[in-house]
Amino acid sequence: QVQLVESGGGSVQAGGSLRLSCRISGVTYGSPCLGWFRQASGKEREWVASVYYGDASTRYSDSVKGRFTASRDTSKSEAYLQMSSLRPEDTAEYYCAATVHGSSVLCSRRRAPSEFDYWGQGTQVTVSS
């Protein structure tokens, strides 16, 4: 059973930085596609970024491109979302998600929450102006 455990959320002022971590366990085959999502109060869950565990290729939503960086460390079985130049509109519950099905190309196209099979518990990020 794949499990994802997140950490690293918190409160920062606008312009600040945070790094979210996602520890991955239970993957016995394949190379996971890892997605980062966020959900603000009263809004739908929104895709933010993806990183393919095998080759570390990444994709970003337009709203975070240039400010957020997704990465992974295979030696630690962890994925990261480095968030910089944070804005109040980045305030949300952030989730990491994974699927073990598909290639790097497929991973680069995944955007919908339904395309990911496993989810972390979420971590709150609050950005004040």
Image: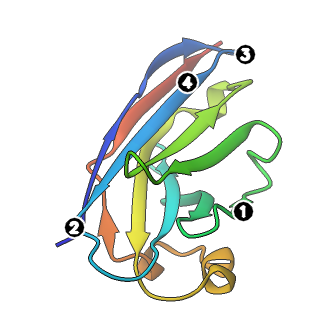
Which numbered tag is attached to residue 18? 4
Callout 3: 10 Å neighbours few (<14), some, many (20+)? some
Q: Going 46% across and 81% down the picture, which residue do you hit? A: 115
Left or right side of 28 for 112: right
Which numbered tag is attached to residue 49? none
Q: Secondary structure at mark 3?
A: loop
Residue type pointed to by label 4? Leu
Residue type pointed to by label 2? Gly
Q: Nearer the viewer, mark 3 or mark 4?
A: 4
Q: Nearer the viewer, residue 75 or 77?
A: 75
Q: Is residue 82 shown to the viewer in this render?
A: yes
Mark 1 and mark 2 lie on one chain; the one further toward the N terminus is 2
- Residue picked out by circle 2: 26
Callout 2: 10 Å neighbours few (<14), some, many (20+)? few
Q: Are marks 4 and 2 in contact (CB under 8 Å)?
A: no
Which numbered tag is attached to residue 59? 1
Callout 4: 10 Å neighbours few (<14), some, many (20+)? some
- Residue that extends furthest to the front in the rendered view of this protein: 75
Residue type pointed to by label 1? Arg
Mark 4 and mark 2 lie on one chain; the one further toward the N terminus is 4
